[in-house]
């Protein structure tokens, strides 16, 4: 993929407004998230604080001051025995979809996860999200489970596919 002048970097608090706008667009327009209401500024700040811990990185794809997409590793589960397992999330601005940004972001997360000592990364991807499922597969994630009909959004009953990569 051509670079197109895009930088992948750790997010900072100046990015939070654009990160939240991208996420809220996904809430309103996609089944990529099962949130049904936009993330408020207060909730966005709480979420952002979790990702100020270097073990739970938040990265952005930026070009000329515009955030084109973001990706994060979050705790997979709060119990201590799960510490070496992380859950990834990726969201791309609508104007930037289809440019390979998701691939660059997921590659960066995988590299960071290995450096941080993660044993595995997991993704919970809506069963109808063929683009994200294909991307995960290209980067070595395998489908390891499927939760059938666990979400309802926009009049659809949706599966969640669990993808996993062990390092």
Image (cartoon, grey):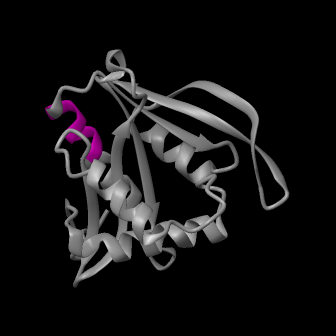
Residue 4 visible within the image: no
Q: Is residue 108 magenta?
A: no
- 20 lies left or right of 152: left
Name of the residue lying farthest toward the right: 155
Name of the residue lying farthest toward the front: 42
Residue 37 or 91: which is nearer the viewer?
Answer: 37
- 69 lies left or right of 110: right
Residue 40 visible within the image: yes
Q: Residue at left 48%, top 69%?
A: 40
How far from the left and from the top, in percent, is residue 3?
Answer: 24, 69
Reply above or below: 23 against 102: below
Q: Assign the magenta stretch its main secondary structure.
A: helix
Name of the residue lying farthest toward the bottom: 64
How far from the left and from the top, in percent, is residue 96?
Answer: 44, 74
Quadrant for the C terminus in the image: top left
How far from the left and from the top, in percent, is residue 141?
Answer: 44, 32
Quadrant for the N terminus in the image: bottom left
Residue 95 or 19: which is nearer the viewer?
Answer: 19
Q: Residue at left 32%, top 54%?
A: 105
Picture quarter containing residue 20? bottom left
Reply above or below: 130 against 6: above
Q: Residue at left 23%, top 83%?
A: 65
- 13 lies left or right of 91: left
Q: How many marks?
A: 0
Reply above or below: 34 against 122: below
Q: Residue at left 35%, top 76%?
A: 17
Q: Which residues are magenta?
A: 109-115
Name of the residue lying farthest toward the top: 81
């Amino acid at each position: 993929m051509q670079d197109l002048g895009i930088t992948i970097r750790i997010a900072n608090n100046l990015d939070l407004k654009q990160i939240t706008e991208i996420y809220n667009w996904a809430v309103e327009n996609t089944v990529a998230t099962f949130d049904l209401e936009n993330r408020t500024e207060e909730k966005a700040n709480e979420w952002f604080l979790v990702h100020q811990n270097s073990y739970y990185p938040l990265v952005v794809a930026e070009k000329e001051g515009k955030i084109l997409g973001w990706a994060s590793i979050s705790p997979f589960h709060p119990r201590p025995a799960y510490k070496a397992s992380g859950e990834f999330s990726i969201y791309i601005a609508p104007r930037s979809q289809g440019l390979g940004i998701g691939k660059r972001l997921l590659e960066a997360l995988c590299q960071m996860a290995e450096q941080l000592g993660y044993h595995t990364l997991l993704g919970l991807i809506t069963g109808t999200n063929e683009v994200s499922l294909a991307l995960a597969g290209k980067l070595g994630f395998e489908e390891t489970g499927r939760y059938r009909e666990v979400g309802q959004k926009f009049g659809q009953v949706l599966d969640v596919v669990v993808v996993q990569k062990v390092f």
